[in-house]
Image: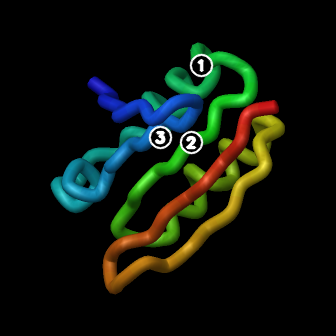
């Protein structure tokens, strides 16, 4: 089950451990994004660039950016307008 930490209108989701354990939770993220209110900012932490996740968020109409924070730590930021 997807867990998010909320800070005002920002949902922070850390998927690093799950992905490193072989899980592919992108559809859970998509469902979470769809059910979240407009103007939500999503900060998603992943161990690699996660192109399928980023592409899916862009296909949903979100503005998406990627930052490399450290080795095996990337942050995807997406905004739902």
- Spatial CA distance of label 3 from label 2 is 13 Å
Q: Nearer the viewer, residue 36 or 20?
A: 36
Callout 3 crowding tier (Cα within 10 Å): few <14, some 14–19, many ≥20: some
Q: Which residue is mark 2?
A: 42
Residue at the disc numbered 1? 36
Q: Earlier in the sequence, mark 3 or mark 1?
A: 3
* Neighbours of disc 2 within 10 Å: few (<14), some (14-19), many (20+): many
Label 3 – label 1 distance at C-alpha: 15 Å
Q: Are marks 1 and 2 in contact (CB under 8 Å)?
A: yes
Quickly name the residue at label 3. Answer: 26
Task: Check disc 2 and report its element: helix, strand or loop.
Answer: strand
Depth check: give the residue in front, 2 or 39.
Answer: 39
Q: Is residue 17 above or below residue 5?
A: below
Name the element at disc 1: loop
Based on the displayed image, in which of its 4 quarters is residue 62 positioned?
top right
What residue do we see at 59% from left, 27% from top? 33
The answer to which image quadrant residue 59 occupies is top right
Q: Which of labels 3 and 2 is toward the front?
A: 2
């Amino acid at each position: 089950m997807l867990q998010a930490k909320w800070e005002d209108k920002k949902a922070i989701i850390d998927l690093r451990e799950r992905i490193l354990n072989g899980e592919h939770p992108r559809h859970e993220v998509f469902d979470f994004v769809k059910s979240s209110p407009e103007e939500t900012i999503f900060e998603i932490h992943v161990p690699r660039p996660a192109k399928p996740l980023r592409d899916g968020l862009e296909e949903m109409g979100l503005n998406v950016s990627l930052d490399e924070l450290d080795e095996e730590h990337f942050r995807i930021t997406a905004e739902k307008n």
